[in-house]
Image (spheres, grey):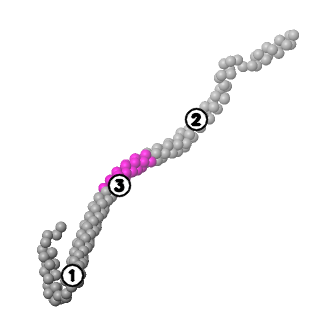
């Protein structure tokens, strides 16, 4: 047992205590500080300027892109306004052209209707003239037929033949009297 107690005591003496675990030995501490200083100087001397330069380039690129985007936005807004103006002008022009076309169509329509009415009136007048001419011709033929029939009838009634010329004058006088009578 004794021996066991000695082994435990020796083991307890060799194991570091709680503060020894947190604080390293001086040689390790000095080596760590020197390594940190070397890495820090390397980063500060070489890596930091390159990193700063890269960040500055990136910042400038972003700033340039933002400025370009703003310019593009302004240009797009200007183009949009121009297109709206042109579209409004085109619509106005289209409305004007449509109105002119309607007016021209109405004018042509009026001309066609007027021409058709004139032609219709001419056709009616011509038809009336032809009807009046035909009526006069038919009336003249009817008079001649009536005179002939009257003479034939008078011959049969009287039984004697009268002078043809005298009879004709008698019938013409009768027809002239008929013409002077008011027509109903």
Q: Residue extending furthest top?
A: 1
**First in sequence: mark 3 vs mark 2:** 2
Residue at 75%, 19% in the rendered image: 15
In the image, residue 147 sits, relative to residue 82, either above or below, namely below
Mark 3–mark 2 CB contact (< 8 Å): no
Q: Secondary structure at mark 1?
A: helix
79 is within the stretch colored magenta? yes
* Spatial separation of the CA atoms under disc 3 and disc 2: 71 Å
Quarter of the image with the N terminus is top right
* Spatial separation of the CA atoms under disc 1 and disc 3: 101 Å
The overriding secondary structure of the stretch rendered in magenta is helix
Report whether residue 132 is seen: yes
Mark 1–mark 3 CB contact (< 8 Å): no
Q: Which residue is denoted by mark 1 in the rendering?
A: 157
171 is within the stretch colored magenta? no
Tell which of 25 and 102 is nearer to you. 102
Tell which of 124 and 14 is nearer to you. 124
Q: Quadrant of residue 141?
A: bottom left
Q: Which residue is denoted by mark 3 in the rendering?
A: 87
Q: Position of residue 147 (x, y in %)?
A: 20, 82
Q: Position of residue 134 (x, y in %)?
A: 24, 77
* Spatial separation of the CA atoms under disc 2 and disc 1: 170 Å
Which mark lies nearer to you, 3 or 2?
A: 3
Left or right? Give the position of 153 relative to 18: left
Quarter of the image with the C terminus is bottom left
**First in sequence: mark 1 vs mark 3:** 3
Number of the label disc, if any, that sits on residue 120: none
Report whether residue 104 is seen: no
Q: Position of residue 105 (x, y in %)?
A: 30, 63
Q: Which residue is denoted by mark 2 in the rendering?
A: 37
Q: Secondary structure at mark 3?
A: helix
Stretch in magenta: 65-93
């Amino acid at each position: 047992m004794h021996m066991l107690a000695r082994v435990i005591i020796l083991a307890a003496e060799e194991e570091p205590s709680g503060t020894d675990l947190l604080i390293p030995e001086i040689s390790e501490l000095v080596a760590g500080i020197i390594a940190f200083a070397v890495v820090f100087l390397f980063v500060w001397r070489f890596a930091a300027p390159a990193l700063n330069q890269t960040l500055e380039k990136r910042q400038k690129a972003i700033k340039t892109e933002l400025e370009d985007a703003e310019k593009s936005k302004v240009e797009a807004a200007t183009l949009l306004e121009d297109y709206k103006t042109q579209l409004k002008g085109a619509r106005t022009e289209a409305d004007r052209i449509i109105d002119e076309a309607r007016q021209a169509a109405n004018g042509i329509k009026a001309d066609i209707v007027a021409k058709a009415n004139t032609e219709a009136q001419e056709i009616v007048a011509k038809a009336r003239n032809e009807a009046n001419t035909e009526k006069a011709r038919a009336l003249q033929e009817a008079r001649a037929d009536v005179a002939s029939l009257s003479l034939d009838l008078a011959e049969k009634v009287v039984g004697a033949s009268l002078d043809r010329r005298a009879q004709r004058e008698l019938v013409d006088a009768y027809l002239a009297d008929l013409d002077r009578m008011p027509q109903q």
